[in-house]
Image: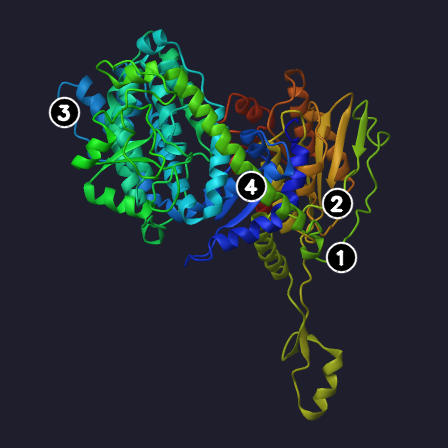
């Protein structure tokens, strides 16, 4: 069975959306603050939008993350990600979380300063650290920008915090425990490829990569990565991981975010020498930059939701009172030594909760414990006792778990791991597979029942915004523009409008619509009667017979905004995924916020054996459901782009409109072919000479690249080059300025 397609995933997402929102409300029912909104989108991002207080779930990303094949698997994956994000909103306090990351970065930079500079540097402010990383260190032959260093430390913090909040979630919400097991098993099964010993020995960067991978696996799965013991069980890197393991364990078991952040700082302190070695230039600056970028990419890929920013105060934080040491799987590699009183409390809390748990050790073992559990209690190959979820390591019996006699270990724990590596690999794989299959049977059965009970007809819940008004304007034909381009076709909508606008976008559009309605209403003033001066009101002359002189009136001004707007949306092959989603979200907000106020046409343009315009929304068309959002989900995808022809065709259409003010906006993620850039520049100049305001918006996913310069040269004025996330605000700003002109 193959993975669900993006279309199939989105259809299921639409079906479960109402249920998703209800479960989200229930999930925050015990909190005093208002629950954040939640919605699902056709992209690959999972994050919390703190500005709009919305949990953003990406349907396509969920399918790719977990290799989803069925409806039931998709629903359980959505519930896992939802639970993960909800618990972040409940338990990840922003201030201490950010403090831990920043302080970790500062400690690394303080260490580098102590190694590279003869006198101790005094960092007086946060800005001093950033300038030291970005400006001073490159001159010393050390390449690590503040941004790159912060991403590395943030990756460590996010790994541990993910483990902490998922442990809390599994303890508080019983249904989440099996969801965590199933979906973390998918991560564990798809473990990293380990570099050869020689590379780790010679390349500190490879060693750092191994360590950060194990931090993620130990924190979220409480197991070493799949195949780690087999590949590197006897390598000294195991000792480095063991050295930071207590801090990983304490971070995962932390009661509050602040306690977790303290452990991130301690890990940063221990890794500072290694990070320093990684950032020293060995051959060329370009090589180290490339390596750091690859390392950061791997760290970001390992995160479920990127670096969280949940704007949660410490006073509202959902603390972990019980401190349950539940691990993801029935057995754990994660070991933590705790004070005696903490051990006793955790042992008491764990009673009756079944098998499995993080391996907790008493700081001062009792004589009975020593006798029962053996003297060598640090072997990484040992697991929890079968009869409790909080237990010291197994007794050393002279035989391994397969019944074979172990060789006497030498001086290092790594040696023991190496000798048992084959068994450990098979045992872990078998344990993960069996646990996942058992949990999946139960979870998928519940998911099937839930899907069967969901009402797939949600149209009755959609509030209409007035009667639907069809577009009566004449379609543009090839005959109409034969003097402009050799081949042209205007494509009408070939799909039904069935998808409601996501809650956050609908709310934003509605709020802006109210503001625009107030503004347009203010342009006109009503007729005023009963005045003692002004124009005579014939209907009031009779008042003179009994001395009433208020027979005058002032005629109101019936002023209307006389303008129209044509939005051209790039629909070339590169406009897929997040680019398409963000651009359509921007036009969707415009469509809602100027509904019934200004004639607006939105068309997607591309080029394939001729110029193609797909009409997203007609000039006077008003539909109950948003046209732009439905195009995002169901509209066709194009091939290339030939902006000059598109601008010329739009210009001709605008000149045929009766409005006095005309605006043409071009939204694009790339340049036309170099050969046609000059042609496009000429088309823009020609439109402006005819009185049309032409504005270009160029966007990229991430930092702005070299094409921005070419875009500026092409448009000369009235252009904006921005990151993809800013398209919405830029387009709204342009429309507001135009409508107020």
Graded by Cα atoms within 10 Å as few (under 14), some (14 to 19) or many (20 or more), the crowding at tag 3 reads few
Q: Residue at x 75, y 80 (%)?
A: 539
- Tell me the distance, in whole angstroms, between the alpha carbons under discs 4 and 3: 57 Å
Element under disc 1: loop
Per the image, the residue denoted by label 4 is 443
Q: Position of residue 311 (x, y in %)?
A: 39, 47
Pick whichever of labels 3 and 1 is earlier in the sequence: 3
Q: Residue at x 48, y 52 (%)?
A: 27
Mark 2 or 3: in front is 3
Q: Are marks 4 and 2 in contact (CB under 8 Å)?
A: no
Of 465 and 104, nearer the camera is 104
10 Å crowding of disc 1: few (<14), some (14-19), many (20+): few
Look at mark 2 in the image and give the residue it sits on: 619
Find residue 210 and report its horizontal and vertical position in percent. Answer: 36, 19
Q: Earlier in the sequence, mark 2 or mark 3?
A: 3
Residue 119 appears at what percent x and percent y?
13, 21
Mark 4 and mark 2: span between their CA atoms?
49 Å
**Which is more toward the observer, 26 or 232?**
232
For label 3, the SS is: loop
Residue at numbered disc 3: 120
Left or right: 308, with 127 as reference point: right
User: Sequence-wise, which precedes: disc 4 or disc 2?
Assistant: 4
User: Which residue is rendered at x = 74% and y = 87% of the image?
Assistant: 542
Farthest residue to the bottom: give it.
Answer: 546
- Which residue is under mark 1? 467
């Amino acid at each position: 069975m193959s993975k669900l397609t993006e279309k199939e995933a989105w259809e299921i997402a639409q079906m479960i959306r109402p249920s998703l929102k209800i479960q989200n409300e229930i999930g925050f029912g015990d909190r005093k603050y208002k629950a954040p909104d939640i919605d699902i989108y056709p992209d690959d991002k999972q994050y919390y939008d703190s500005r709009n207080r919305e949990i953003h779930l990406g349907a396509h990303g969920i399918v790719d993350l977990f290799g989803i094949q069925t409806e039931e698997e998709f629903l359980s994956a959505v519930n896992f990600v939802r639970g993960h994000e909800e618990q972040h909103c409940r338990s990840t306090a922003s201030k201490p979380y950010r403090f831990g990351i920043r302080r970790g970065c500062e400690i690394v930079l303080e260490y580098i300063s102590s190694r590279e500079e003869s006198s101790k540097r005094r960092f007086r402010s946060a800005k001093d650290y950033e300038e030291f990383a970005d400006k001073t260190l490159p001159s010393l032959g050390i390449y690590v920008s503040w941004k790159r260093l912060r991403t590395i430390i943030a990756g460590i913090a996010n790994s541990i915090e993910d483990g902490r909040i998922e442990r809390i979630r599994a303890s508080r919400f019983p249904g989440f425990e099996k969801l965590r097991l199933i979906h973390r098993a998918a991560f564990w099964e798809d473990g990293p490829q380990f570099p050869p010993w020689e590379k780790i020995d010679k390349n500190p960067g490879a060693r750092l990569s191994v360590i950060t991978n194990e931090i993620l696996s130990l924190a979220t799965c409480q197991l070493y990565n799949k195949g780690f013991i087999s590949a590197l069980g006897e390598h000294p890197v195991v000792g480095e991981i063991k050295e930071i393991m207590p801090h990983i364990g304490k971070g995962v078991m932390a009661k509050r975010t602040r306690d977790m952040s303290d452990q991130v700082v301690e890990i940063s302190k221990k890794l500072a020498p290694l990070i320093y070695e990684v950032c020293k230039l060995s051959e060329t600056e370009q090589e180290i930059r490339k390596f750091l970028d690859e390392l950061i990419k791997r760290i970001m890929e390992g995160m479920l939701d990127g670096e969280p920013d949940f704007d949660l105060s410490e006073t509202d934080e959902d603390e972990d009172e019980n401190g349950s040491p539940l691990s993801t799987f029935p057995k754990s590699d994660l070991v933590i030594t705790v004070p005696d009183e903490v051990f006793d409390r955790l042992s008491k809390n764990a009673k009756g909760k079944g098998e499995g748990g993080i391996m907790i050790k008493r700081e001062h073992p009792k004589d009975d414990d020593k006798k029962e559990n053996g003297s060598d209690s640090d072997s990484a190959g040992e697991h929890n006792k079968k009869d409790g979820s909080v237990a010291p390591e197994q007794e050393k019996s002279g035989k391994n778990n397969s019944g074979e006699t172990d060789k006497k270990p030498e001086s290092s724990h790594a040696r023991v791991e190496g000798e048992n590596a084959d068994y450990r690999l098979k045992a872990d794989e078998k344990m993960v597979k069996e646990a996942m299959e058992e949990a999946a049977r139960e979870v998928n059965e519940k998911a099937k029942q839930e899907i069967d009970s969901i009402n797939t007809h949600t149209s009755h819940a959609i509030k209409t915004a007035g009667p639907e008004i069809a577009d009566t304007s004449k379609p543009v034909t090839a005959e109409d523009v034969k003097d402009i381009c050799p081949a042209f076709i205007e494509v009408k909508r070939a799909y039904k409008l069935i998808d409601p606008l996501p809650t956050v976008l609908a709310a934003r559009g509605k709020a802006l619509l109210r503001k625009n309605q107030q503004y347009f209403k203010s342009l006109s003033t009503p007729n005023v009667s009963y005045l003692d001066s002004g124009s005579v009101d014939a209907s009031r002359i009779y008042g003179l017979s009994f001395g009433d002189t208020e027979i005058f009136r002032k005629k109101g001004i019936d002023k209307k905004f006389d303008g129209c707007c044509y939005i051209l949306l790039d629909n070339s092959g590169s406009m897929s995924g997040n680019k398409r989603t963000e651009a359509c979200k921007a036009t969707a907000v415009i469509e809602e916020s100027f509904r019934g106020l200004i004639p607006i046409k939105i068309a997607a343009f591309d080029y394939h054996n001729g110029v193609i315009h797909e009409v997203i929304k007609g000039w006077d068309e008003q539909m109950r459901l948003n046209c732009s959002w439905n195009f995002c989900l169901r509209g066709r995808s194009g091939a290339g782009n030939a902006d000059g022809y598109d601008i010329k065709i739009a210009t001709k259409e605008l000149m045929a409109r009766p409005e006095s003010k005309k605006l043409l906006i071009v939204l694009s993620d790339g340049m036309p072919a170099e050969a046609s850039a000059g042609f496009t520049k000429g088309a823009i100049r020609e439109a402006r000479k005819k009185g049309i305001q032409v504005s270009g918006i160029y966007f990229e996913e991430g930092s702005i690249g070299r094409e921005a310069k070419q875009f500026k040269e092409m448009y000369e004025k009235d252009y904006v080059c921005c990151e993809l996330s800013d398209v919405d605000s830029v387009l709204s700003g342009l429309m507001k300025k135009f409508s107020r002109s």
